[in-house]
Image: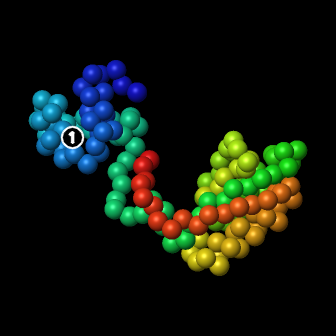
Amino acid sequence: MTDDPTDRALLDLLRRNARLPAATLARRLGMSRTTLQGRMDRLERQGAILGYTISEPASSDPVRAFVMITINARRAAQIERDLRGVEGLRELHAVSGPSDLIGQLGADSPESLDQVIDTIGTIEGVERTHSAMILSTKLGRN
């Protein structure tokens, strides 16, 4: 993304530990904190640094689950279009293995989550679903 060796070194430090204080980053790179902040601002504008996070769960959904979906391959395109309209489906991935798709679901209650799973099961061409509720997140990285 950048040809500047100092920018690359800064991005590498942030990749390894994005929580390092600016003073520590500046010291490790041999520059003033003000110079470092200017570089970081420029890298944000260029899109090399995409943002910052806060100490909240990755998802604001109180109840989350994964649903594995087995489909009729001949209807794959239509099923994907139908799934895009399902309220509560946060992510959808094509996968290898016994299931064809894996979706991440989010809802405000177990009952709402159950309704989302039922909705997915009624889509024409969906042959089977298998779900697993997320009890806790042990590691979350972006």
Residue 35 x %, y %: 17, 35
Q: Report whether residue 85 is seen.
A: no
Q: In the rendered view, would you say 14 is above or below 80?
A: above
In the image, what residue occupies the spot 30% across and 27% down? 8
In this view, the residue in front, 51 or 42, is 51
Q: Which structural element holds mark 1?
A: helix
Residue extending furthest front?
Answer: 98
Give the side of residue 125 with respect to residue 138, left or right.
right
The coloring applied to the image is: rainbow
Q: Report whether residue 48 is seen.
A: yes
Which quarter of the figure is the N terminus placed in?
top left
Q: In the rendered view, would you say 64 is above or below 7?
A: below
Q: Which residue is mark 1?
A: 37
Q: In the rendered view, would you say 50 is above or below 126?
A: above
Residue 119 x %, y %: 76, 68
Specify few, some or many for label 1: CA neighbours under 10 Å numbering under 14, 14-19, or 20 or more. some
Q: In the rendered view, would you say 134 is above or below 19?
A: below
Q: Please name the amino acid that badge 1 sits on.
A: Gln
In the image, what residue occupies the spot 45% across and 61% down? 137
Residue 13 x %, y %: 27, 36
In the image, what residue occupies the spot 65% across and 55% down? 103
In the image, what residue occupies the spot 67% across and 59% down? 67
